[in-house]
Image (cartoon, rainbow, N blue to C red):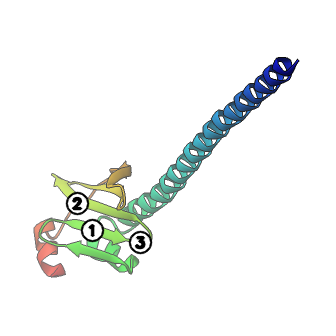
Amino acid sequence: MNNRQTSKTGLFLMELMMAILFFCLASAVCVQMFVKGHTLSQRSVDLNHAVVRCESLAEAFYSCDANMQHVLRLFNNADYDFESDIITIDYLDSLIVTGKLEKTGEIFTLNISCVNEDTKEEVFSIAPSIFKNHKGGSYEKEKILWN
């Protein structure tokens, strides 16, 4: 009679351990899904911010008719390297927007990219172009006058 009670108790403990194991596995899967959801949400927020900032620089490029001196005046936190024609806009968060100005004939292209400083990953890029006909000077002369 004593053996039957012991075996029932052992069976109950085994069932309880299996239930605890099942709940541990289910909670581990749930935690993993929440972490992936948070990461996806953060990447989506970074992408939205990057698109807005790159489009802002592209619209400034268009509205200033590819005159980088005027574009530079529109952004307080911008830095422009006149030798390599690169504009860098450093926002207070981890996103940095850079634009490299390239000239092909009369077409000016600003290759804009937004990089996450923490992960060193490019979040978004765009390359707006503008046709600029100089009738009284060349691009190189304007570049010298900017300095």
Query: Which residue is farthest right?
Result: 1
| Relative to 20, residue 93 above or below | below
Q: Earlier in the sequence, mark 2 or mark 1?
A: 1
What residue is shown with label 3?
91
x then y, percent, for residue 127: 32, 50
Q: Residue at the location (41% across, 72% down)?
A: 91
Q: Quadrant of the C terminus?
A: bottom left
What residue is shown with label 2?
101
| Proximity of marks 2 and 1: CB atoms separated by less than 8 Å | yes
What residue is shown with label 1?
87
As shown in the figure, which amino acid type bears the numbered disc 3?
Tyr
Front: mark 1 or 3: 3
Query: Is residue 7 found left or right of 97 in the rendered image?
Result: right
As shown in the figure, which amino acid type bears the numbered disc 2?
Leu
x then y, percent, for residue 67: 28, 70
Q: Quadrant of the N terminus?
A: top right
Query: Is residue 100 found left or right of 122 in the rendered image?
Result: left
Q: Nearer the viewer, residue 2 or 86?
A: 2
